[in-house]
Image (spheres, rainbow, N blue to C red):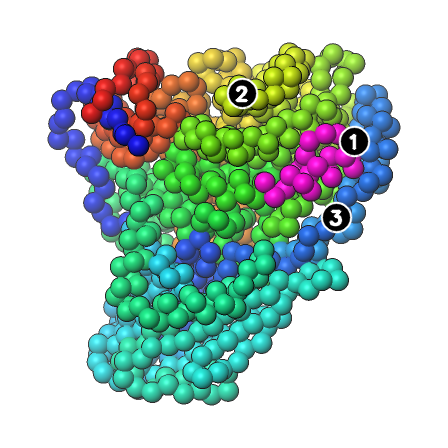
């Protein structure tokens, strides 16, 4: 395909000290990890590895993104729709609490829902333990020159230290080449490596040694008559010097100078021939020299990572270990301009490492888990988590990493059609609050949170965004049935509200939130929460647009166009000036609730903008002021995004400093107290990766926006970043790649690259201009 270059020279190129960031993008530490939240995450989109860098014993947690307990199930209550008229009658009469009791009785999923199998859980693959024996055990307790680090530019971790005059080094990576995990252990003096290697798992595993190879295998629980998922891990070594033997089911290395450990793993997810695949990958890696594998790994990884660079001018912060730098930043956030860049690029690194085309999207923990029972099952929450996980990928030039989500959603359509009929006697398909790799679409097990039905429509926003950024018409043709089916569901289940005359969802709820009724009782179940109205409006418009582009479904277009006129408005403003969360101006039970779902129209949608809907934008500001800045990490990240969309760069930056609070807490938290672990993974707590991805998207949103019908550069630039800066490779809707730099808060040059000729509107330095494209 021919490419065209559109070059807009806004000023002469000058020396701005904003050249692409040349400081190494790495996390580094001067001591081993003392808990899992300090270990370094490695991944190639399928396999994960988290080493702790221990001196006498190294513990490395292993993961495979496909390893789930559970199985496909049908937890629909096929009698549920019979209760729908009574539930709607009670809601129409203002008896929401009584309606909620009926929902709990007849309108939730059958069985235990997400509380066990067959819903299932994302699980740790296993643990690799390496015990080291040093000739001088006394000095092994006091190593010198210790350092461990993770290079974001190479996706390689290492640690080095000195014991009794010998320098030891370990290098780790999950190869993007031959799809195995590799650890290279070396000493700078011959014969100094004496160690044992063991594989284990807390349950449902067998480990054996066979011909110098460790094998760990097992089968997880399914909760059904059929067996659960099977897995296999194989480990082999290559030695330079020394000898290899075994002690029961451990490998023993004596007097070696170098040990390379190769780990191949797989599951029978989707019927994969996993035993063969494990052997093929392992044999290919063993047939490749370490140097070749390393080069191949870096090359494949950098094809994605090197697409974007960001600089924020001179950084005068002291060079210190990442955990200490995090503490220093929290004390004085204006002194460190590099940490925001590092955190942004770390988010891109996590995206590349936790998903790949043809596999699964990142779950609640990406692909890293150290437990059998991962918090919240490590599943896909549909009331913000999995959507937030994908918010940075388009703007950050990782567009193809949205495709695994599209495949996951495609697999939900058939189950979702059964759910739509069972509960609403409706056409199309629906998903509620949670899903898994098995296609769960039923309501959750409690009315207080499980009946929110915006999940499927919200997913359609993510799918649409990939088209908006790429303008890939073949992709649009592929996802159109998904979008259409979702619109058909909402269209057929909308109910006429006698009080307002609007078409509304009933029953529904605003994600995980509740309110006071006039009689003082509380409820979650309602009609027409704001998020539903916004998502349905956006979805109908997108389906109408797609149908026109593809020349399809004229009758459907007419029907959706007519119903758009009968929907509630994008937002209503309450008497205190805030955006109303519900159709009625209820008093919320928790004013600082973690969810801010009624601002969906501000982000990720483009229904509310300061330019087009200033009154609603102002109501959003007042809503955010009352909600406050604290919360779980993902909630703080969402607020950062809202303030960026409201063009308040300083407030957005304040939210960034809020999320960067250092913490080591791992308790389950639903309120204030989110932060960042020493390894820069986000803490709810516990670890939830959506906080990382939401913040990554938020930093990009501060620098470039393209949702309002034009590209805007520096829409929310904080004072601390104004001096100089440069961005290369970020993406804008319309299939544009954008490079630009600034000085004193003003863009001084800009280059926009696209694949076809057109005029483009760009807002630069407060002025909206239309540029004609020029063929390069």
The x, y position of residue 684, in whole percent, is 53, 47
The magenta segment is 410-432
Q: Disc 2 designates what residue?
A: 551
Is the residue marked by circle 3 packed among few (<14), some (14-19), or many (20+) residues within 10 Å? some
- Quadrant for residue 207, please give it: bottom right
Between marks 1 and 2 in the image, the one whose residue lies nearer the viewer: 2
Secondary structure under tag 3 reads loop
Residue to which mark 3 is pinned: 74
User: How much space separates mark 2 and mark 3, taking CA atoms?
Assistant: 36 Å
Magenta stretch containing residue 35, yes or no? Answer: no
Q: Please tell me which residue is depicted at 33% across the width and 51% down the height of the picture.
A: 301
SS at badge 1: loop
Q: Quick one: 169 or 428, which is closer to the camera?
A: 428
Q: With 138 as the anchor, is 511 left or right in this view?
A: right
Residue 424 within the segment the image draws in magenta = yes
User: Which residue has dot 1 on it?
Assistant: 425
Camera-nearest residue between 210 and 710 = 210
């Amino acid at each position: 395909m021919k490419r065209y270059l559109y070059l807009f020279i806004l000023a002469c190129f000058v020396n701005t000290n904003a050249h692409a960031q040349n400081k190494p993008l790495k996390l580094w530490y001067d001591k081993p990890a003392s808990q899992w939240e300090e270990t370094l995450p490695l991944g190639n989109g399928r396999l994960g590895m988290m080493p702790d860098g221990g001196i006498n014993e190294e513990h490395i947690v292993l993961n495979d993104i496909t390893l789930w307990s559970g199985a496909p199930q049908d937890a629909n209550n096929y009698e549920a729709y019979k209760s729908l008229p009574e539930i709607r009658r009670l809601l129409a009469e203002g008896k929401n609490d009584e309606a909620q009791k009926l929902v709990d009785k007849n309108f939730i999923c059958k069985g235990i829902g997400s509380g066990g199998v067959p819903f299932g859980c994302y699980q740790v693959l296993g643990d690799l333990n390496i015990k080291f024996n040093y000739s001088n055990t006394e000095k092994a307790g006091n190593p010198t020159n210790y350092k461990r680090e993770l290079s974001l530019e190479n996706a390689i971790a290492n640690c080095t230290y000195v014991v009794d005059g010998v320098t030891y080094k370990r290098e780790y990576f999950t190869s993007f080449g031959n799809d195995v995990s590799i650890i290279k252990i070396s000493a700078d003096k011959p014969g100094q490596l004496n160690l044992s290697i063991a594989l284990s798992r807390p349950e449902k595993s067998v480990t054996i040694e066979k011909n110098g190879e460790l094998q760990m295998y097992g089968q997880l629980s399914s909760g059904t008559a059929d067996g659960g998922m099977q897995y296999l891990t194989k480990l082999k070594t290559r030695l330079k010097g020394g000898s290899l033997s075994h002690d029961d089911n451990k490998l023993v290395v004596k007097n070696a100078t170098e040990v390379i450990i190769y780990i191949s793993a797989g599951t029978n997810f989707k019927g994969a021939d996993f035993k063969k695949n494990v052997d093929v990958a392992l044999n290919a890696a063993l047939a490749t020299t370490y140097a070749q594998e390393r080069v191949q790994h870096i090359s494949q990884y950098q094809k994605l990572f090197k697409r974007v660079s960001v600089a924020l001018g001179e950084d005068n912060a002291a060079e210190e270990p990442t955990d200490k730098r995090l503490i220093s930043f929290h004390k004085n956030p204006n002194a460190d301009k590099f940490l925001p860049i590092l955190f942004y690029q770390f988010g891109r690194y996590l995206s590349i490492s936790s998903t790949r085309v043809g596999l699964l999207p990142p779950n609640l923990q990406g692909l890293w888990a150290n437990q059998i029972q991962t918090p919240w099952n490590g599943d896909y929450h549909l009331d913000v988590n999995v959507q937030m996980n994908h918010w940075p990928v388009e703007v950050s030039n990782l567009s193809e990493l949205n495709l695994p989500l599209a495949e996951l959603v495609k697999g939900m359509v058939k189950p979702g059609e059964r759910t739509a009929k069972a509960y609403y006697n409706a056409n199309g398909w629906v998903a509620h609050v949670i899903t898994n790799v098995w296609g769960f679409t039923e309501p959750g097990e409690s009315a207080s949170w499980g009946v929110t039905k915006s999940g499927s429509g919200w997913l359609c926003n993510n799918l649409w965004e990939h088209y908006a950024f790429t303008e890939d018409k073949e992709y649009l043709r592929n996802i159109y049935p998904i979008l259409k089916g979702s619109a058909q569901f909402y269209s057929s289940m909308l109910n006429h509200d006698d009080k307002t005359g609007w078409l509304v969802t009933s029953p529904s709820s605003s994600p995980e939130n509740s309110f006071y009724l006039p009689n003082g009782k509380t409820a979650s179940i309602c009609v027409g929460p704001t998020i539903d109205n916004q998502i349905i409006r956006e979805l109908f418009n997108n389906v109408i647009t797609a149908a026109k582009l593809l020349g399809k479904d004229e009758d459907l277009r007419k029907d959706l166009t007519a119903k758009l006129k009968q929907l509630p408005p994008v937002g209503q403003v309450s008497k205190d000036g805030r955006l109303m969360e519900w159709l009625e101006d209820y008093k919320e039970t928790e004013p600082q609730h973690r969810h801010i779902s009624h601002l969906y129209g501000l982000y990720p949608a483009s229904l509310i903008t300061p330019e087009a809907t200033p009154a609603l934008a102002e109501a959003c500001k007042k809503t955010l002021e009352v909600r406050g800045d604290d919360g779980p990490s993902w909630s703080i990240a969402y607020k950062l995004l809202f303030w960026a969309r409201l063009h308040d760069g300083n407030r957005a930056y304040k939210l960034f400093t809020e999320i960067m609070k250092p913490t080591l807490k791992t308790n389950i938290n639903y309120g204030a107290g989110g932060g960042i672990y020493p390894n820069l993974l986000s803490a709810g707590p516990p670890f939830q990766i959506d906080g990382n991805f939401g913040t990554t998207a938020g930093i990009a949103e501060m620098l470039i926006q393209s949702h309002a019908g034009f590209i805007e550069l520096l829409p929310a630039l904080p004072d601390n970043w104004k001096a100089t800066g440069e961005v290369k490779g970020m993406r804008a809707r319309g299939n544009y790649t954008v490079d630009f730099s600034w000085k004193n808060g003003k863009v001084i040059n800009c280059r926009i690259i696209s694949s076809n000729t057109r005029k483009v509107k760009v807002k630069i330095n407060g002025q909206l201009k239309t540029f004609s494209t020029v063929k390069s």
